[in-house]
Image (cartoon, helix red, strand yellow):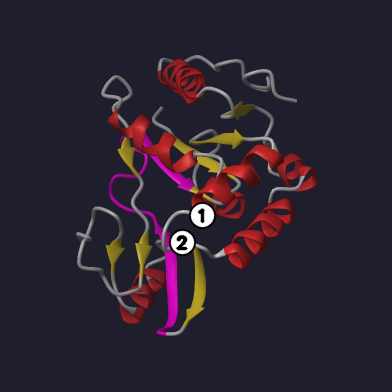
Amino acid sequence: MKHLFYLIGKSATGKDTLYELLLQDQSLSLEPLIPWTTRPIRANEKDGVEYHFTDSDGLRRLEAEGRVIEQRTYHTEHGPWTYFTVDDDASLSEDRLGIGTLESYMKIRDFYPPGYVVPIYIEVEDGIRLARALKRERKIGNHRYEEMCRRFLADQKDFSEEKLNSAGIVRRFKNEDNREDCLREITAYISTIQTGGDAGKGETGNGSI
């Protein structure tokens, strides 16, 4: 059985970097789950790489076909932009890697057959995570402290223990002191599942609670 390994975690947990490193690991042979959006393509982007780009009419057509799994709409100064996940031709035919929110994970998990979507929850102690976010915002031209605080507080609600337990998130991968150790543990976990093992299903990862 093929799987969709889905990275989730609060902001500043390093999941974007882990996502890129896992895709680069040829031993895992993971294909990216590329999201869709109605926002305009930017100069440095290519359709089908960062996103699949469409418009509101394209979104409605995909909805009519029953292929839209989940979606989020953000109201920007340029109008509403929707980001969404589509059930495409590659689904179930290859091992894939996705990244998103706890809410998107639950919707994607419920769309596909049981066991196909495997959550990989990245965890970092809140003090370390806040320090990382602050360091990032202090970079030249990047001082959105109010937005940083808003997102930090929103994460506390969106990834509460109650919601994690409700979603069935048990195993956790800590990405605090050594990213290589975290990456090594996730790689081993994915590899074991790919070869038919359960990788210690139901156990916590890397000394987490």
Q: Looking at the picture, does residue 200 appear above or below residue 74? A: above
Residue 8: x and y, percent? 55, 43
Q: Nearer the viewer, residue 162 or 79?
A: 79
Label 2 sits on residue: 142
Q: Position of residue 122 (x, y in %)?
A: 58, 35
Q: Nearer the viewer, residue 134 or 102?
A: 134
- Where disc 2 sits, the SS reads loop
Q: In this view, does 123 lie above or below 133?
A: above
Q: Which mark is residue 205?
A: none
Q: Mark 1 points at which residue?
A: 138
Disc 2 crowd, CA 10 A, few/some/many (<14, 14-19, 20+): few
Which contiguous range is marked in magenta? 78-99
Magenta-drawn stretch contains 13: no
Looking at the image, residue 141 lies above or below residue 55: above
Q: Image point 46% across, 24% down: which residue? A: 183
The answer to whether marks 1 and 2 mark residues whose Cβ atoms lie closer than 8 Å is yes
State the image quarter where residue 147 is shown.
bottom right
Amino acid type for the residue under numbered disc 1 = Arg
22 or 127, nearer to the observer: 127
Q: Position of residue 30 (x, y in %)?
A: 32, 32
Q: In which quarter of the image is the N terminus?
A: top left
Q: Where is residue 115 in the image (x, y as percent from the top left)?
A: 54, 33
Q: In which quarter of the image is residue 169?
A: top right
Occupied quadrant, residue 16: top left
In the image, residue 154 above or below residue 118: below
